Amino acid sequence: MSEGEVVSQEVATVSEPTSVSVQAAMAMIELSRRDGGQIDIETLRELRGMAKELRDEERVQWFARDMSSAQAEMEPVVRAAEVKLGDGKGSYKYAALEHIDLMLRPIMTKYGFSITYDRSPRSADGGGYVVSGTLWHRSGHHITAEFALPLDSGPGRSNAQAAGSTDAYGRKYILLGFFNIVRKNEDDDGFAAGAVPISRDQAARLVQLVDEAKIAVGTNDEERKVSIKQWFTLNLSYEIGAYTHIRQEDYARIARLLKSLADQAKETEAEGMKV
């Protein structure tokens, strides 16, 4: 390709679905006018309310259709960013927010999605933040999610840096959750060769935190086990058959996240017991 040559990329355009339901409601209004010459205010309000409800349903359907098309074009994001632990402790890799955005932004634009974020104090004692995200669609429909996190304090970090790190971490996992984005290693998607598993004591600690965090959802033991496994798959981006299959490099982050959810569950329970 010669310098200056323009390459055009065809972008699929999805027109707004024909609002048959709204047209039907408006037709009913017109018929009522013809039959009686006038239409009373209460009937008009009911018909307009019905038209709005039907329109909202169509927006949800449009959102779901574009989401399905967008997810079909998404690819797993490679863990390419690296953190060196120092003192000869090695390093670990992770999928950086900018790498996720690089893959996702063109697809979001193509199908009319956008995201806005907000952040609020997690509790009165300054114990972190609740990062919230809203996924908007060109139809006007939107969904929201929240992620409660302790302050990501680390060696040499100022309060501002800790707040920024916490905010970025929350935005990343909200984004991953909205689109069910998978992360993978450069070499494999399973338990990496040479990876060190957590100890039995660490596994026992996670079992305790899972119970305290109340992440299990379902009406029976089997459903609750499935929901726990799904939670770990989302936050680890690889499947585990047992707690001891979790990599040592992921333990601190997972334990911190579960502890945050456990603290939040305890606060909610305490609030419910107040008279």
Image (spheres, rainbow, N blue to C red):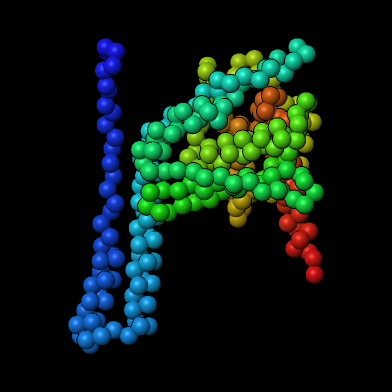
Residue 273 falls left or right of residue 7 = right
Q: At x 61% / y 51%, what residue is drawn?
A: 217
Quarter of the image with the N terminus is top left
Residue 209 falls left or right of residue 216 = right
**Above or below: residue 35 compared with residue 47:** below
- Percent across and percent down for residue 193 are 61, 15
- Percent across and percent down for residue 22 are 29, 66
Q: Between 266 and 32, which is closer to the camera in this rendering?
A: 32
**Residue 191 in view here:** no
Res. 21 image quadrant: bottom left
Q: Between 74 and 224, which is closer to the camera in this rendering?
A: 74
- Percent across and percent down for residue 267 are 76, 54
- Percent across and percent down for residue 56 are 39, 61
Quarter of the image with the C terminus is bottom right
Q: At x 32% / y 85%, what residue is drawn?
A: 40
Res. 230 image quadrant: top right
Residue ranking furthest to the left: 34
**Above or below: residue 184 compared with residue 164:** above
**Above or below: residue 135 compared with residue 31:** above
